[in-house]
Image (cartoon, grey):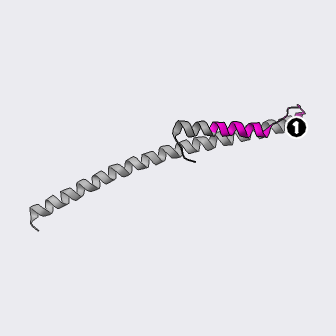
Amino acid sequence: MEDSEKIYFLNDKIESLEEEIIELKYQLKKAKDKELIYLDILSNIYGAIKTLFKREEENNRFNLGEIFDFRENIVSLKSSLDEYIRIYKLRL
């Protein structure tokens, strides 16, 4: 192989690797964005559950007489998850 052929081959290989790097960076950014969405979902679920348990604890402690419908809360949580799935086109 002549020097000019080697240089052409190496330049072609470099260009191919640079394109692969660009594609991998794009896939990494996409994965990080999706991770942030999932973290937001988990954070919201955690916050909602924590608030619910705190309200129930205060209700019991101070005898407030509030009745908690956990099924209603789960249905609400499912609706929120459905909205996330719709907005961000997620597959769970």
Is the magenta region chiefly helix, strand or loop?
helix
Q: Judging from the image, what secondary structure is the residue with disc 1 in?
A: helix
Amino acid type of the residue tagged 1 in the rendering = Asn
Q: Which residues are magenta?
A: 61-80
x and y percentages locating residue 35 in the rendered image:
52, 46
Q: Give the vertical position of 17 relative to 43 (above or below).
A: below
Q: Is residue 69 magenta?
A: yes
The residue shown at (88%, 37%) is 61
Q: In the displayed structure, does residue 42 sit left or right of residue 51?
A: left
Q: Is residue 79 left or right of residue 57?
A: left
- The reply to whether the magenta stretch includes residue 25 is no
In x, y percent, where is residue 73?
Answer: 74, 37
Q: Position of residue 20 (x, y in %)?
A: 32, 54
Q: Which residue bears the numbered disc 1?
A: 60
17 left or right of 69 in image? left
Q: Local crowd at mark 1 within 10 Å, few (<14), some, or many (≥20)?
A: few
Residue drawn at the location 26% of the way across and 55% of the way down: 16
Q: Nearer the viewer, residue 67 or 90?
A: 90
Q: Which residue occupies 17% across, 61% down?
A: 9
Residue 12, by quadrant, is bottom left
x and y percentages locating residue 58 in the rendered image? 83, 36
